[in-house]
Amino acid sequence: MLIKNCRLVLEDNSEIIRDILIKDEKIVEIGENLQEIGEEIIDAEKNYVIPGVVDVHTHMRDPGLSHKEDFTSGSMACAKGGVTTFIDMPNTIPNTISEEVLEEKRKHSLSMSYVDYGFHFGGSRNDNSKEIEKVKNGVASTKIFLNMSTGDMLVEEEKTLENLFKSSKIISVHSEGEMVKRAIDLSRKYKKPLYLCHLSLGSEVELLKNAKEEGLEVYGEVAPHHLFFSEKDRNELLRMKPELKSEMDNSELWKGLNEGVIDTVGTDHAPHRLREKMEKVTFGIPGVENSLEMMLRGVAEKKITMRRLIEVMCINPSKIFKIKNKGDIKIGNDGDLVIIDIGKKRIIERDQVISKCGWSPYEGKETGGTVLRTILRGRTVYNQEEFFKKTGREVEYNG
């Protein structure tokens, strides 16, 4: 595949127009006026071309809750949203807390996805550290819930936490408020990298900043809904954990994102059917389908630069979790690209939603642009409302 006239954003936020040649799934050349060879030649028409988005925080609900979402519908939503790699969380049914369940999940997922994917493994209150030792090199992280979860995944016992931390290569945590400090303390004590999921408070950003200044290997994530909504917007649909916070917290999150304190944007894609949300308080909202286009709105509103968007949605997630050949447009990496038209803004409407849940928290919101085409390893998987072959496969990790 040869993609011509790509508008690329460099590290200093300057822009250049280049052609990109992909061969045998890898980027092999980036240059001017490349020879028109290849099975497919695409003209990007000087639209922005960015690396495929890497969303390391998704709940695809499969297996066990596939009436809400499954790997196929969720990966279609990813493809439409410019996400070429997603990492699935372990609180499916059954919980992914043993090697046996992980292998069953892998088999179940084969040939189901339009984009590439990986798995987080779960820590258990019953101390599954021996299971973590067996699988840790083939998963993104060990996910530990310090605040709330389903099944046996809420971990409170100090000795169990010690064993889970010691046996893991990197720990992702659901921690809110004072539990963020506890997670950082555990990272310091056991000398393990820590990834703080879905920060929502300005005070949590301050804790992260202090940890980084101390020299700890601690990373922070923010979800788009904690940037674009506040507690004033809360209704039956906009309920999630952590809950929406104040507009002042929104501002502190944007600031932390821009200043390099917060490292990534992850959606916490956690869909429920509309009826389930309306019948009772149900925590979780969909996100992968609209995350990039909403963050482009942040670019349009000058809340974030295009380069910083690329860093927090593509480059950094891949670096933190050492996902092989993903996250950046460079020779040798997978040919995962997204062509976006920032001049083509649109209003998000329910009848456009691809996710099986059938709704979006961003309905009625104007995007900051439109995903025109999503390319996975040199093959188009989505192009202007049309989906192509399911070629997604499990990612690999460096080290």
Image: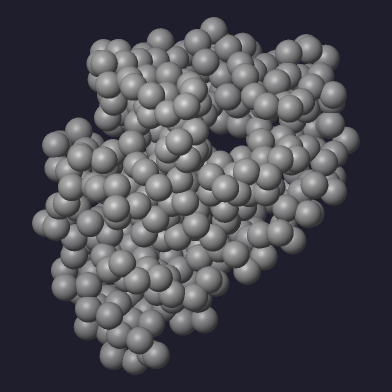
Could you tell me which residue is drawn at 47 percent across and 27 percent down? 279
Image coordinates of residue 162 in percent, x first then y, are 78, 19
Residue sticking out furthest to the right: 130
Quadrant where the N terminus lies?
A: bottom left
State left or right for residue 280 relative to residue 61: left
Residue 287 picture quarter: top left
Residue 3 picture quarter: bottom left
Position of 294 relative to 198 (above/below): below
Could you tell me which residue is drawn at 29 percent across and 47 percent down? 350
Image coordinates of residue 244 in percent, x first then y, are 37, 19
Q: Of 241 and 170, which appears nearest the observer?
A: 241
Residue 315 visible in the picture: no
Position of 263 relative to 82 (above/below): above
Image coordinates of residue 47 in percent, x first then y, are 18, 65
Q: Of 395 and 108, which appears nearest the observer?
A: 108
State left or right for residue 329 relative to residue 18: right
Image coordinates of residue 174 in percent, x first then y, are 58, 24
Residue sticking out furthest to the top: 178
Position of 66 relative to 89 (above/below): below
Could you tell me which residue is drawn at 61 percent across and 16 percent down? 147
